[in-house]
Amino acid sequence: MEVKNNPAGRLHDLLSAARNQNGKESARKAWAAVFGIEPDDTGALLKMLADLIDLVHETKTSIQRLDDVNHQLHLKPFKKIEALLSQLNLEAGWEHSKAQLDEPTLYGLQFSSDKLSRISGFTQIANDEISLLRKQLDDLVSSVVDSNLPQDVKFLLLRNLEAIRHALLAYRVRGIEGLQEEVERSLGSVMLHRDEIAASKNKPEERKVWETFFKLVEQLNKVVTLARNSKELAAPAIQAITQLFG
């Protein structure tokens, strides 16, 4: 299923997936299945749940900004959604929590999604594009881990790559805005360490890895730009960074 171009649509799809989970499983396993992560990866699971809670707030705010709808009607589903997310217990059975996600609650989100989708300036990003970026990122992570790069360079690269990995994983929750924020954060990190990176220009292994990283960020930027139907937001910054290798 393509990721929706508005917060209500993304929230609806995620909660629909949660509703479809086996009630006999633990909440941990149910949410892990929804987010596509391993149940025992508690750190990643908590990050995704935090993103989901942020998505609930974003959706409510987006609805409240609409000036031609009945706000009380559109906000009605959030009573049960917030009750569900305010009593998180990953080790509890899923059946009780699942009961909060009834048909009227999800149906109400569909109405909001339809309204918000009509005023969104974003288009959807194809799932295969996200999958390709994740594959390229995983390959780069593996090459960095197996490389003989200095530990400080490895740490800087892996920290940035793990942040991009989370942004791609959380795309179903955070949408295009989350990817854009990660492009901007990655470029900011690189500019902060530009002297260290520039020193890699005469070291073939380091240079190759950094160039591959830049290409990944540039490709992510182009995907975001296309989805936003705008000019490349970070093109000047990327050009400035590539000039570090002259």
Image (cartoon, helix red, strand yellow):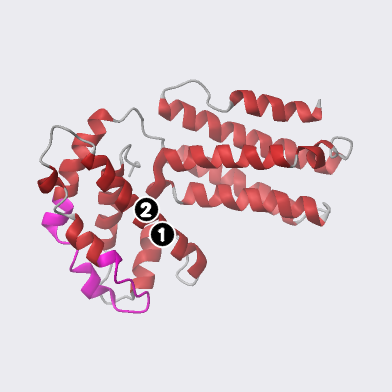
Type of amino acid at the residue the image marks with label 2: Asp
**SS for tag 1?**
helix
Whether residue 15 is situated above or below residue 70 in the rendered picture: below
- Residue topped by disc 2: 54
State the residue at coordinates (72%, 50%).
156
Q: Which mark is residue 89?
A: none
**Left or right of residue 27: residue 67:** left
C-beta proximity under 8 Å, tags 1 and 2: yes
- Residue 133: percent from the left, percent from the top? 55, 41
| Residue 194, above or below 58 | above
For the residue pair 65 and 94, the one nearer the viewer reads as 65
Identify the residue at image location x=40%, y=65%: 32
Mark 1 packing: few (<14 Cα in 10 Å), some, or many (20+)? few
Q: What range is drawn magenta here?
A: 84-107
Q: Residue at x 41, y 55 (%)?
A: 51
What amino acid is labelled 1 in the image? Answer: Ala
Which residue is painted at 76% across and 26% down in the image?
Answer: 243
**Residue 98 belongs to magenta span:** yes
